[in-house]
Image (cartoon, rainbow, N blue to C red):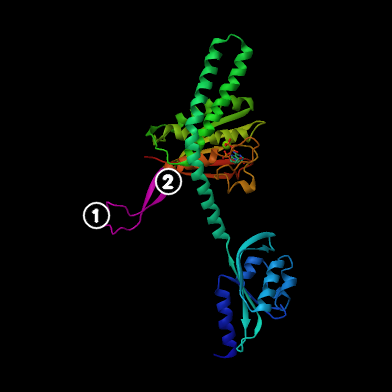
Amino acid sequence: MTSDSLKTYYENILASIQDGIIVVSNDYAITTFNPAIEEMSGISSSHVIGKSLESVFSGESRLVELTGKTIGSGVTYSDSDFQIIRRRDRKPFPVSLVISPLSDENGNTTGAILVLRDMTRARELEDTLKKADRLASLGTLAAGMAHEIKNPLGGLRGAAQLLKEETGDEKYKEYLDVIIKEADRVNSLVENLLNLSGPKPLKLKSVNIHKILDGVLLLEKGILTESGIKVIRIYDPSIPSVIADEGQITQVLLNIVKNAAEAMPNGGELTLITKIFYDYIIIPPHPPLRKGGGGELGRRETKMVLVEVLDTGGGFQEDALSQVFTPFFSTKSKGTGLGLAVSHKIVEDHRGRIKVQNRTDGKGAAVQVFLPIA
Ligand SMILES: Nc1ncnc2c1ncn2[C@@H]1O[C@H](COP(=O)(O)OP(=O)(O)OP(=O)(O)O)[C@@H](O)[C@H]1O
Ligand SMILES: [Mg+2]
């Protein structure tokens, strides 16, 4: 190989490595800065070659310190929990860092090689696992507590209900309503926690989605009229029944309509739309295999019912969109952040999908629920 093609050869290797690589000489001058580290740090190599590591990474003093140690002692240092600041958005970027001494043929240290591995995905997975773990222990706790809470709560609610029926005093009735309402709220919180924590058997039957939607509107009538929200229903009358758990789907749509109402405290428009939607699903090879089918993946068109809930509130906050299905994520002072998390789980249990986005035809949120038609 000529020295030129050798150079290209090594450059190609460096460019192909997914890990960020920085090479510095004994005096900390940067001699190599590969594309992966350009991407991670958001700094172009043309700005750093020949410059000192200290001047480029002035905010990351530990990087410079460890490099100094490596050059001084000829020993490899590593830190699996390191962060560099991405210049583009000033966001910390998680990396694992290994700094090895660079030696010449006589074994003299002539610099250091820094290898930075992107740990974003690993951290995300860790977070998901931690969350799942937290949910699992929460589930055990919730299941244990549910009975203990629900029984006395039921007694409390029943007694309040009786008192309300027997008292002739309107003022007391009002207080008793508060007790009943709050008892229901605690009850639904406990139910939600139970729902999230484990598989809940579906009580499947043929249900009419429009009936469920109208039921939800009836349940929410109080808050809708109170806030001055106009309801628009655009139902497709040709939609057939779906096989679903009526109670659970009611809860999904109730959670979504509640959110919409909460987003429009000063009035607005709530639009409920139903339509038929054709979706392709991938069918995994599953015994018994079709005759002659070699276990290949199948693609089948499925008919789905799409329920869209549109509001004219403020819409999802930008950072909220990716987190709304995370349990306990809430931007509301009194929210528990379980509504959409529970809804997501229920819809998935039904082999459906749920999507959230902001409207493109004006201000407000758009939530879509897809449910397979039998
Ligand atoms: N229609 C909507 N418009 C704007 N933001 C919404 C809407 N629906 C949900 N969100 C956002 O998603 C977050 C999560 O919603 P979710 O229903 O899971 O919890 P919550 O409403 O805050 O509390 P909970 O439902 O448990 O009382 C909300 O806090 C809000 O930020
Ligand atoms: Mg909610």
Assign the C terminus to one quadrant of the image. Answer: top left
Provide residue 216's location: percent of width, then percent of height.
Answer: 51, 29
Query: Range of the magenta residues?
Result: 280-303
Is 257 on the left or on the right of 290, as rendered? right
- Residue 278 — which label? 2
Marks counted in the figure total 2
Asked if residue 314 is positioned above or below residue 20 in the image, the reply reads: above
Residue at the spot of label 1: 291
Asked if residue 42 shows in the view, the reply is: yes
When asked about the image quadrant of residue 90, the answer is bottom right
Task: State the residue in front, 373 or 283.
Answer: 283
Q: Residue at x 51, y 25 (%)?
A: 152
- Looking at the picture, tell me which residue is in the foreground, 51 or 209: 51
- Residue 65, image x, y percentages: 70, 70
Q: Could you say where residue 50 lies in the image, as x and y percent from the top left?
A: 72, 79
Mark 1 → mark 2, Cα distance in angstroms: 27 Å
Regarding residue 196, the answer to whether it shows in the image is no
Image point 74% across, 68% down: which residue? 58
- Measured as percent of width and height from the top left, residue 115 is found at 60, 72
- Does residue 294 appear to the left or right of 142 in the view shown? left
Q: Is the residue marked 1 within 8 Å of ligand 1, measured from its CB?
A: no
Q: Assign a secondary structure to mark 2.
A: strand
Residue at the far bottom: name it.
2
**Residue type, mark 2 in image:** Tyr
Image quadrant holding the N terminus, namely bottom right
Which dot, 1 or 2, sits closer to the camera? 1
Compared across the picture, whether 330 is left or right of 299 comes to right
Q: Along the line of sight, which residue is nearer the eye, 240 or 28?
A: 28
Secondary structure under tag 1 reads: loop
